[in-house]
Image: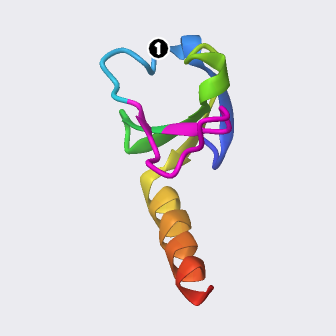
Amino acid sequence: MAFGEHVQSDWGIEDGVTWRKSSFSSMNGNCVEVAELRGEMIGVRDTKEGGAGPVLLFEQTVWRSFIENLKSADSLL
């Protein structure tokens, strides 16, 4: 899979997967959910679609690096 590849959710990635939403998510529906998927991948989806929309896939190492960079940037504010 390519970095940030756009995949339809009917690909079967939701079978037995636990999707998590950030505790910082707002109540206005501007949220994303994240799940650990098979093959060392992370799935990210928009909650507006109720799980039926597209899912972005990232390698776990790329996702972890992204999160660590966000945390570092946040500590600078």
Q: Is residue 12 above or below residue 73?
A: above
Residue range (magenta): 19-33
Instruction: Looking at the picture, tell me which residue is in the foreground, 46 or 65.
Output: 46
The outermost residue toward the left is 16
Q: Residue 18: where, in percent of width, then height?
A: 34, 28
Residue 27 is at least partly visible in this image: yes
| Residue pointed to by mark 1 | 12
Q: Residue 30: where, in percent of width, then height?
A: 68, 38
Q: Is residue 10 above or below residue 39?
A: above
- Quadrant (top left, top right, bottom left, bottom right) of the C terminus: bottom right
Name the residue rendered at 34%, 25% in the picture.
Answer: 17
At label 1, the amino acid type is: Gly
Q: Residue 22: where, in percent of width, then height?
A: 46, 47
Asked whether 48 falls inside the magenta stretch, the response is no
Name the residue rendered at 46%, 14% in the picture.
Answer: 12
Kindly report the secondary structure that dominates the magenta region of the rendered protein.
loop
